[in-house]
Amino acid sequence: MDSFDLGRLTDHDFEVVCRDLFGEILGVPLELFPRGRDRGIDLRHTAADGTTTVVQCKHWPKATQATLAKRLLKDELPKVVALRPDRYLIATSVGLTVDGKDEIRDAFAPYVHTTGDLYGVDEIVAELQSRPELVRRHFRLWLSSTAVLQTVLNQEKYVRSSWLRRRIPRAADIFVPHEGFDRAKAILDEQRVCVIVGIPGVGKTTVALMLAAWLMGSGYEVYEISQDAEEITALWREGTPQLFLYDDFLGQTTLESQLNKNEDARLIDVIRGIQEAPDKALVMTTRDYILEHALLKHERLGTPDISEVTSVVHLTDLSLGVRGQILYNHVHHAQLPAERKWSFADRAVWQPIVEHRNFSPRLIEETLRLAASREQDVAAAVLKNLDDPRRIWERIVENDLTEEAVHLLEVLFTLRTATPDTLNESWTWYRKGRGLEADARTFRRALQVLDGTMVAVEQHGVSFHNPSIADYLRFHFDVGRASMSALLGALIDPAQIHSLIDAAGMADGSGILAQLKAEAERTAAAVLETAEFVEWSFSPEDESEASHLQWILETAELLGSAPLAAHVVKETDSNRWYGEHVEHLVSLVDAMGGSRLIAQEDVERFAGEVAEGIRLDLAEQVGAGDWYGAIGLYETLRQIPGGSLSGPPLEALVECALDGLHVVADEDESFLDAEPLDTLLQFLFDQGYEGGADDESAEDFATVQKLVDRFARLRDVPRFVPRWETAAPGPYSSEARDREVITELMKGLRGPDVTPGA
């Protein structure tokens, strides 16, 4: 039978569990109070006739029975005598013997009726074992069960990633359930897929790891996805419960490197496949602003496949009480001497931290981790880093790291993620460009300095330990602390110049932009060299020569580079666009038309060539009887300045559409979609065909119009919107009560030998 390690619960966790447990045991609702010095009530029920039942909770998992009895007699008995409750129960995480119970019963008589009112750890565990639903309602209690602990600790079997094997137990120690976790879990339970979104540092990855632990407890194997959705297909094993965890699936700072090669389409396919599989699940995380950017750039991501499984972790989910528990857990589990933790028990110390406008679990975790190796006022360091979140990394990068390690971070910023060999090669060129030593031993030493603190070295490559480091490095570059000249001479991968251009285009990237402009010739050369890596694909979602030229033109506009704009003009003067994706060509025409660096005659020339190419494609579609494709090309043609279709080509398109109308009218409606029918009718209406009595196609019009109306009614049926997809909910409890709970919780950092707990 499963047991529980109650020592993994905080004092507050223990009280909340006891409230629900003894509410069921006694069959009455119990009020939960913060622990007070004068009255000593943790849980209470007052009946209609005025009789009072009090449950006192004592969570001292490391204390002995003798210590517990001594403290009860000294601290609690006088309070009980003053309270004079009708019934007094004690719940404790300390083990109680028969003799020990007799001693406590006799001391607290007549308020403790029998030894059955004294619940030691064994009795509490037995009661919990008979109430599995109650256990599952309390996530940290469930996580403390021996079966779950064995699953988490026996990770070789269940977790197929060294990163996850390190992170899940750590996250389990510090995690505090909150509304954001509840919403994400509800979505995952229902949809089998959940996209967790939120601002940097709010705890998205921790929520994802705890969802992984939740499914591990049900026998799921957990796999980290580090590259793209194709990994899921490769790892898929029929008949094996599997969870795929895809952290930062849209990248950490930009989108250019992450959603290429039709990745969005593959993601949608994978999501649909997982939702149809009873033993598969997918959890993904991303930053809120990156998802917004992705929705603008990738239309497929705007489908219900993504929107209906998205759960936002709001900063307001971290109520004051949740923040206090997060701080307590981080400090409690930090690798710090006990005396350095004691200061957090002071309300004047913890309150400014938990109420700080920049409160961030990640910043607290990183500050405490780094403080373990320094003699400093830890609480003051936490507060300073919340005042200036950049400070934590600035101090390390600018003061503590070796020069070769800083240079490695600067190169990694441009690569985002790289194999050690690629990182080494670019780092070597960068160091040589600065006239510095760059041998293999120096590189290994630099990587060793950073591994596990600022970078993670995994099988798939080297990446930043967390996204906030990349955010700091963008500032580091912006204020000119790196050598842009040497860096431009060290580019070996097209992702690197993309990273620099992306950073220069951000609101806080003006300094980077100025540096790239100062190196105009080398920057332009690096931009143009990326053309060698562009490959044609059948999918318009992938990059093409036209979309790459548009990126070059956008870069030219950002840099004010006439040579780059001239390159675009030269490349578009070639008549080699047949077979290129029409959407990319039209987008390039639009970009050229809005450019201040390209002459109007060059825009008109290229627009004319693209329009003529579309007319040729359209004629082929008409000849093949593809009315839907032909109408789509017609609408695209109209977007181009001077683009039009008239005379015999337009007449042929109309005849093709009328033939299509007749075919559609005879089709089985189960094989039809609403969008093509709308497109067909709208085109014919625009050409003057309205299905009137004198129209030969009147019957076909009427049939198709009925289908369109039916589809429209179905689309207008409001979809049920679950609670977790609405605005951010309110906090779990009132702030006044939260402050009292945190006050008592933090006292536990001093331990029962310094100041007694509950």
Image: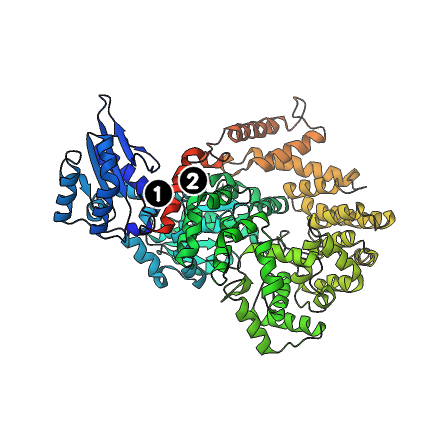
Q: Quadrant of residue 656?
A: top right
Way the structure is coloured: rainbow
Question: Which residue is pictured at 56% across the width and 27% down the height?
Answer: 709
Q: Residues within 10 Å of mark 1 (few under 14, many from 20)?
A: many
Which residue carries the number 1 mark?
Answer: 12
Three-letter amino acid code at disc 1?
His
Q: Specify whether 169 is left or right of 381.
A: left
Instruction: Of the two numbered discs 1 and 2 on the same chain, state the one appearing first in sequence.
Output: 1
Asked if residue 348 can be seen in this view, the reply is: yes
Residue 23: % across, % down? 25, 34
Question: Which residue is pictured at 47% across the width and 57% down the height?
Answer: 232
* SS category of the residue bearing label 1: helix
Considering depth in this image, is 5 or 565 the residue closer to the camera?
5
Q: How crowded is mark 2: few (under 14 residues within 10 Å), some or many (20 or more)?
A: many
Asked if residue 279 can be seen in this view, the reply is: no
Q: Specify whether 438 is left or right of 382.
A: right
Please report contact status of discs 1 and 2: CB closer than 8 Å, yes or no.
yes
Three-letter amino acid code at disc 2?
Gly
Question: Which residue is pictured at 59% across the width and 28% down the height?
Answer: 705
Residue 545: % across, % down? 71, 57
What is the number of the mark on residue 321? 2
